[in-house]
Image (cartoon, rainbow, N blue to C red):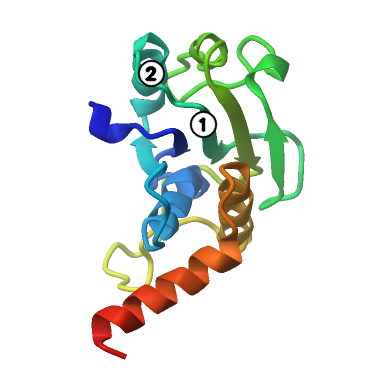
Amino acid sequence: MSDWYAENMIVGCGNPLQTDDGFGPAVIAELKKLSLPDNVKVLDAGLAGPHYLFTLMAQSDIPVKKMVILDIMNFGGEPGEITRVTPDVLSPGAYTDPHSWGLREPLQILAEKTDIVIFGCQPESIDISQMDNEADEAEFWVTESVRKAIPKAMRLALAEVGVDYGTTIASQGNLQRERAGS
């Protein structure tokens, strides 16, 4: 399990089959394409994973100093709008997974030893995806408004763990050129 953790964790939560609920995993998929420092790990916690992941991390001796969580959150904003919250401002029942497991409590326990930030994206739809599953261009079936929020979410998450998004992108390009022998 120690391979899952690093000093800085960026965790995406959600179900890609329910349109905008796939926001967290979609951001993680994009972050995995980047060359990130060794002290930063990105993890797709999936659908029911957050409850177990946060509980296990709260009980672990592995020092995670900073955790950034990416998920959808209905806060009354415009679809694709992103808000930043911390576990201490979540009211009981305000942040649950699709099985109605409260995530506030495990996050508050984990927050006693880890700095936690949640970036919530206002969903447009969390219906079962109606997209043709044969479509090659769609890795994640989020709505257009949420898809447009992915680059901003990447910048915000990386900034929280001290990684400059522009430098990371440039580093990835340099790494690819080095591998190609340019």
Residues at marks 1 and 2 touching, judged by CB atoms closer than 8 Å: yes
Nearest to N terminus: mark 1 or mark 2: 2
Q: Position of residue 2 (x, y in %)?
A: 26, 28
Q: Amino acid at mark 1?
A: Met
Front residue of 56/162: it is 162
Q: Quadrant of the N terminus?
A: top left
Residue 26 visible? The answer is yes
Residue occupied by mark 2: 57
Name the residue: 51% across, 17% down: 103
Q: How many marks on residues? A: 2
Front residue of 172/138: it is 172
| Res. 161 image quadrant | top right
Separation of disc 1 and disc 2 at Cα? 10 Å
Disc 2 is placed on an element classified as helix
| Res. 12 image quadrant | top left
Q: Quadrant of the C terminus?
A: bottom left
Q: Residues within 10 Å of mark 2 (few under 14, many from 20)?
A: some
Q: Residues within 10 Å of mark 1 (few under 14, many from 20)?
A: many
Q: Position of residue 58 (x, y in %)?
A: 42, 13
Residue occupied by mark 1: 67
- 152 versus 6 height, above or below: below
